[in-house]
């Protein structure tokens, strides 16, 4: 079964590379040593695991990303019970991101700003990162496949606003694509100005799928601040996007567009590079049921964000 045939994807089997010696990254496995695959060389041990990975963003009291934390600064709980941290990474790890641009009729005057923000995001990536670009209106289009190139696809410039808004359908397809990626840090960066009007996919399906795939959701609401009130359906959509971002460890922000929007995109890149990744073995394995996750950072004067559940 391919990723595009799945709506609710099973837990991913994750390839984790632990560099022995100099890097000092802690990685353990519950399997006997004799069952581990033989290392390809003296420097690298590649393991197939069923770790649950959690990306954590930590901020200091001045609003800066807190760096230099160690494994002992973190604790993680599943369903209220503390778990042993078996993987810890504080490195500037590669990430992959899918930029989703609302290309429905209501975005007609805002597409220029969305294009510029997407291009700015791509200008900040490295050779080890990967970015794809999608547009969703009445149709869902992949404008650019995952690539480490900073060059902007001509299809982004050709994008036109038309039709209704298939937000949930677009999220479902993009989460499936991200679920097939090998990177530990995977994110959706969504730009929209309104509510879903045409999807077949239910919002609860998207929320469950995001929890299964461990995808960070960054939602940028292009709402004009000159008009604080908005239709009830748009207000409900904004609340849902805010809840999705919080549940996955991402962020929801409002932006008037322009330079402010580009700055928010730049912040997402910086955040993905500043995160900590911790992993634990689920006590009962992946049993297909939702489980709560709570992360605690044992440092004063910091705040943190992380996903709140896994399936």
Image (spheres, rainbow, N blue to C red):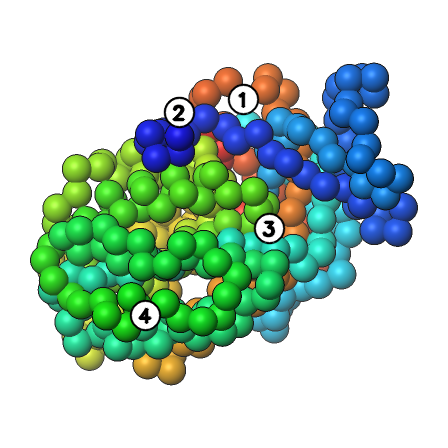
Sequence-first disc among 4 and 3: 3
Q: In which quarter of the image is residue 190?
A: bottom left
The CA span between labels 1 and 4 is: 42 Å
Q: Disc 3 or disc 2, which is closer to the eye?
A: 2
Mark 2 Cα shell of 10 Å, populated few (<14), some (14-19), many (≥20) = few
Position above or below: 122 against 51: below
Q: Disc 2 or disc 4, which is closer to the eye?
A: 4
Image check: 160 left or right of 142?
Answer: left
Q: Mark 2 points at which residue?
A: 1
Q: Position of residue 255 (x, y in %)?
A: 32, 72
The CA span between labels 2 and 4 is: 32 Å
* Callouts 1 and 4 close, C-beta under 8 Å: no
Q: Could one spot residue 81 in this view of the protein?
A: no
The residue under the point 75% across, 56% down is 69
Sequence-first disc among 1 and 3: 3
Give the SS element for disc 3.
strand
* Callouts 3 and 2 close, C-beta under 8 Å: no
Relative to the observer, which residue lies in front, 210 or 2? 2
The CA span between labels 2 and 1 is: 19 Å
Give the SS element for disc 2.
loop
Q: Name the residue under label 1.
A: 286
Q: Disc 2 or disc 1, which is closer to the eye?
A: 2
Mark 4 Cα shell of 10 Å, populated few (<14), some (14-19), many (≥20) = few
Sequence-first disc among 2 and 1: 2
Image check: 75 left or right of 3?
Answer: right
Q: Mark 3 points at which residue?
A: 56
Q: Disc 1 or disc 4, which is closer to the eye?
A: 4
Q: Quadrant of residue 94?
A: bottom right
Q: Name the residue under label 4.
A: 154
Q: Disc 1 or disc 3, which is closer to the eye?
A: 1
């Amino acid at each position: 079964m391919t990723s595009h045939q799945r709506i609710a994807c099973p837990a991913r089997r994750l390839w984790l590379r632990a560099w022995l010696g100099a890097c000092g990254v802690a990685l353990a496995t519950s399997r006997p040593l004799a069952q581990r695959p033989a290392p390809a060389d003296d420097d690298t041990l590649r393991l197939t695991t069923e770790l649950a990975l959690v990306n954590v963003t930590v901020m200091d009291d001045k609003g800066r990303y807190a760096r230099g934390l160690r494994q002992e600064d973190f604790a993680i709980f599943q369903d209220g019970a503390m778990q042993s941290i078996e993987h810890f990474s504080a490195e500037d790890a590669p990430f992959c991101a899918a930029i989703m641009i609302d290309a429905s009729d209501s975005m007609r005057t805002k597409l220029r700003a969305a294009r510029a923000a997407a291009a700015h995001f791509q200008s900040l990536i490295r050779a080890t990162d990967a970015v794809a670009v999608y547009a969703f209106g009445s149709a869902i289009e992949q404008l650019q496949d995952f690539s480490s190139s900073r060059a902007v696809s001509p299809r982004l410039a050709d994008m036109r606003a038309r039709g209704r808004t298939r937000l949930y359908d677009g999220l479902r397809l993009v989460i499936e694509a991200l679920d097939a990626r090998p990177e530990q840090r995977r994110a959706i960066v969504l730009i929209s100005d309104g509510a879903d009007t045409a999807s077949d996919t239910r919002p609860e399906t998207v929320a469950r799928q995001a929890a299964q795939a461990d995808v960070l959701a960054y939602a940028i609401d292009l709402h004009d601040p000159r008009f604080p009130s908005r239709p009830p359906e748009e207000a409900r959509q904004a609340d849902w996007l805010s809840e999705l971002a919080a549940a996955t460890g991402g962020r929801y922000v409002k932006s008037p567009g322009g330079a402010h929007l580009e700055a928010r995109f730049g912040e997402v890149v910086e955040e993905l590079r500043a995160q900590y990744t911790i992993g634990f073995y689920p006590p009962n394995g992946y049993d297909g049921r939702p489980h709560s996750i709570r992360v605690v950072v044992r440092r004063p004067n910091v705040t943190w964000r992380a996903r709140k559940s896994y399936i």
